[in-house]
Amino acid sequence: MGEAQFATVNGVRTAYETSGSGFPLLLLHGFPRTRRTWEQITPALSERFTVVAPDRRGYGDSERIPDPAAYGLAAMAADAVALMDHLGHERFIVAGHDKGAPTARRIAANLPERVVGMVQIDSTPQGVGEGRRDPSGRQWYFDFFRQRNVAEPIVNAIPELFFGLFLDRNPHLSPEKRAFYVEMFSRPGTADAVIWDYRLALEEDPDYWRAEVAAGRKITVPVLSIWGGSGPSANADVLGAWREVADDVRGWPVEGSAHYVQEQQPEATVAAILGFADELGLP
């Protein structure tokens, strides 16, 4: 991807890249990544869409906010929508991977008049479909990040080692990209930001979706879910979980990929998104 642009939206200085001139497509990265996670698929997607790829608050070149409460899902969703407002995009597709996915589904649930379709990459709503989940997909750091005043000092003391543990689980990453992410996540304020992003998503997402299901509310916009054929969702009933919270669901595993589908199988990811756009009747 190219050079970042900046806009202050929702009170946060946000870095983003945009390319193409078609229907707007908002891409929300997860952990431990930045907007660079999309760089293998952006060129092809830009031939059809106006692609908008921000660094979420606390990540990449975007502003770090010292208030832990600033990393809740409502704030993350408001940032993304405010950026689309700033760019003049009234309606759009939203796609999210990893911890960008809860933000994407919050936007789709709350703003169906603006979201024409949602793409979820290796993610399902928390708090529902528990019997459909594969317990082996649960990661040790889920519980670690929940430990207030414990996770922060540990990660801040050894950021390169800690984030390197995650990056070294991704052998597809080039040495250049690994070095980039280590530097990015070692910047002052980043460890606290990403811990709180992860922590609040783990705390807020389950309660939100349990309440939605109990109230009989579902996501009404079309949903595409793709996940890694050998990743943490490989043995889970992904579509079954999605159908508990959304009316219109389709999806499949992407073979040859684990968690980082867009990086490990970029052509298949592009094909899935383009096919979804065709189904939605978009130009």
Image (spheres, helix red, strand yellow):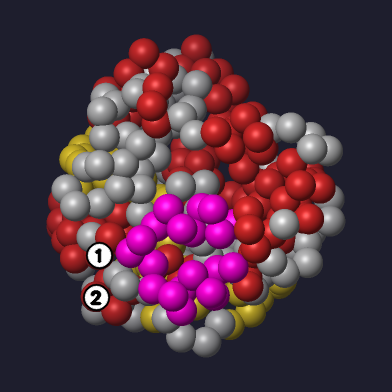
User: Residue 18 appears at what percent x and percent y?
Assistant: 45, 78
Q: Are marks 2 and 1 in contact (CB under 8 Å)?
A: yes
Closer to the camera, 241 or 75? 241
Q: Is residue 59 above or below residue 231?
A: below
User: Of the numbered discs in the image, which one, if any, rests on residue 214?
Assistant: none
- Is tag 2's residue or tag 1's residue first in the polypeptide sequence? 2
Alpha carbon separation for disc pair 2 and 1:
10 Å
Mark 1, Cα crowd under 10 Å, few <14 / some 14-19 / many 20+, is: some
Dominant secondary structure, magenta: helix
- Quadrant of residue 62 within the rendered picture: bottom right
The number of numbered discs placed on residues in the rendered structure image is: 2
Badge 2 is on which residue? Answer: 44
User: Residue 200 appears at what percent x and percent y?
Assistant: 67, 37
Q: Is residue 190 above or below residue 133?
A: below
Q: Is residue 6 magenta?
A: no
Q: Residue at x 46, y 47 (%)?
A: 98
Residue type, label 2: Ala
Magenta span? 163-182
Q: Is residue 108 visible?
A: yes
Q: Is residue 169 left or right of residue 191?
A: left
